[in-house]
Image (tube, coloured by chain):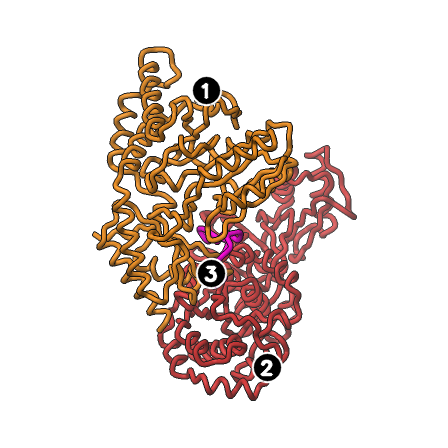
Chain colours: A orange, B red
Amino acid sequence: MINRYYDNAATTQMSDGALEIYSRTVRDFSANPSSAYQAGKLAHKELERQREKVASLFRVESSEIFFTSGATESNSIALHNLLWKKKRGTILVSALEHPSIARYKAFFEDQGFTWKIISAPEGYVNPQQLAQQITSDCVAVFVLLVHNILGTVQQIEEISSVVKEKEIEFNCSIHLHCDISQAVGKIDFSLNSLQVDTAGCSAHKFEGPRGTGVLYVRNRFPLRALSNGGNQENGLRPGTQALPSISAMAYALEQAMESDKQHLKALRTRFEQSIRADRRITMLSPSIDGNTPAAPNIISIADRNVPSEVFTRLLYDKGYALSTTSACSNNSRHAAYSWPQQISGFDKDLTRGAFRLSFSRHHTFSDIDTLVSDIADVCSYFNR
Amino acid sequence: MEKHTFLARLGEISLKGQNRDFFEKKLKMNIKYKLRPYRNTVKKQKGRLFIEVEKDCPVEHIHNVLSKTFGIVAYSQAIRCEKDLESILASAVSIMDKEKRPRSIKTFKVESVRSDKSFYLKSYDISKEVGHAILMAHDDLKVDVHNPDCVVKVEIRDAAYIHPYEVPGQGGLPVGTAGKALLMLSGGIDSPVAGWYMAKRGVHQEAIYFHAYPYTSDEAKEKVISLAKILNSYLEGITLHIIPFTDVQLKIKEKGREEEQTLLMRAAMMKIAEKIAADNNCEAIVTGEALSQVASQTLQSLSFTDSISPLLVLRPLIGLDKEEIIKVSRTIGTFETSILPYEDCCTLFSPKHPLVRPDKERMYQSLSHVDMDDLIEQACKDEEIIKL
């Protein structure tokens, strides 16, 4: 059967294996991991085993892994930590950030912070330009690893060294946070080598369950809780841990990290080659074989003559699931994603027609060929 | 069998001369139609309508019907009782028991009307007796004849009717008394309001909507259906004609000058509306146009679109500001649906600089150059009809 689900960057279907682990954990570890009796201790032991597993997959220490409800909460904990500081300085946020960070602008400005956008021409933050933007009052830098619309991969290691140099230059500490949601299982990386202070992701982006995610906090980095009322997760994230979800996430993470990224890349290459032959379609994402790093699973394309929500309507009719990235005045309030205005380098007609396809490792060449032919059909309808 | 009893006061109809009967009959029919399937009787008695509905019918439904039926100025729910003083006093006291707390009534007055002159007490005496009874039962109430919190009305007719409040109705004339028109319904704020204004003057309406899939979404169509449903509560069964408009629009885009696109589109719509109106015995077209609201609604633009069809075009909003239209749209309950974000025209067909002062002769030339008569014919044939 042809797989027409191309919205894996929005969410993925939980894998059978993860579901199996989920049910098994529900049955086998029903006690509260904080309880003192035997069953509670067993659940606690299982929880810590999962933490170690997640930590080792990310190549960090288990004391650096905290379980949350997902990337949005992880991002929020990182952001809110800034409120505890006496200093009200500048927060530098990349133009690529997900709304779970970008929408905090007004809130932090109300709190006395200066919120500055780091430009990202064609989807890339330039570390050298960032260096020039960091001033002595900078308190935090937020840059994601893989952009959710273009799939561009940021040079976080370089950004991290730039931030460290500035910390020494200005004798201050700058919180570097990285949202890794779209990167897990799509590109090879280790959290350790990113050299960030905090990072976050959601399990449902890599075939794990919804409502579960990870917050990575570098050892000895001072971070305070967003909510209080319990001592779970070392006091950082109170609430009884959802052990079945956490175990299922750890399993899904292992599968994602060890999956064959070459297959995703081969799918992407095949798609790119076919779509390039069709002159009516323009790629907004960089080529996977180009000079700039890109995640193989996310690609944004456009027919510059047709608004994206009109173009995708016919693809929806054919059973496809995908997201429009443009916000034509037609239904801007309902567009799944609006084209981030700060991302420069694309003309207006192109962004108006842009929509995103996100592959999964389960797609086949035959799926891709059908997709390309259906896109060509739709193009023909509009260019008749 | 116990029944809900309502009294409705008629407005403008009462001023009608020899054809008053026609208006009253139509109003009775409209009320009966809307109250179905509940068994009901609607009787006319001396300037009032007496509406009795079987007890199974929820009171809210009756309120909903009467508050949205044109021709009724005000109505009230009444208690019907025997025409003897004892029953009248007991009913009046029990009504006050029910009404006092929820309406925080502190003062009241009693007004009586005696259509049945054979009743042994005069109106003034009825009021005096009823007022006395209420005061005896409720020692915390006072009479205030100038500015009371509650007016208890007692009417002596075939029986005694007592009612403690009046609900304002829509006014206007019964729908259908002014014939039938075709409403051009888009998904916006204005057109449902235009439909409501014409319904208020007694015009029954069918509606026409131009759907350009995939350039406009099916959600936009659903939105228009929802609007038609809301409007239908003021009418007596609305028929919605959905016209597939994509091919016409594409032809205009292909062959028309960019700045003329909107006007050519309006012209095509008028032509189609004229045909649908003729096929369905509609004597006029109703639009939500307001002077100079957009480029296609300037005097010159309207003069052009108006000249496309010989049919009478009614534009009840022509002199209203957007704010005024929005206000009515909120009152009649269409606003929340109208502002749903599914718009009726794709930006692809909206020229950046549309003509504001078109030259009629030149527009006629463009119209014949685009030549869409066959497409218009086909669109009318392919219409989808939804009866609500």
SS at badge 1: helix
Choose between A106 and A64: the one closer to the eye.
Answer: A64
SS at badge 3: helix
* Three-letter amino acid code at the position of disc 1: Asn
User: What stretch of residues is rendered in magenta?
Assistant: A330-351
* Three-letter amino acid code at the position of disc 3: Arg
**Real-space Cα separation, disc 3 to disc 2, in angstroms:** 30 Å
Q: Quadrant of the C terminus of chain B?
A: bottom left
- Asked where in the image residue A308 lies, by quadrant, the reply is bottom left
Image location of residue A154, percent across then percent down: 44, 43
**Real-space Cα separation, disc 1 to disc 3, in angstroms:** 46 Å
Query: Quick check: do tags 1 and 3 share a chain?
Result: yes
Image location of residue B85, percent across then percent down: 65, 44
The residue at which mark 1 appears reads as A234
Q: Is residue B253 left or right of residue A371?
A: right
- Asked where in the image residue B18 lies, by quadrant, the reply is bottom right
**Real-space Cα separation, disc 2 to disc 1, in angstroms:** 73 Å
Label annotation for residue A352: 3
The residue at which mark 2 appears reads as B358
Circles 3 and 2, Cβ within 8 Å, touching? The answer is no
Q: Residue at x 67, y 49 (%)?
A: B153
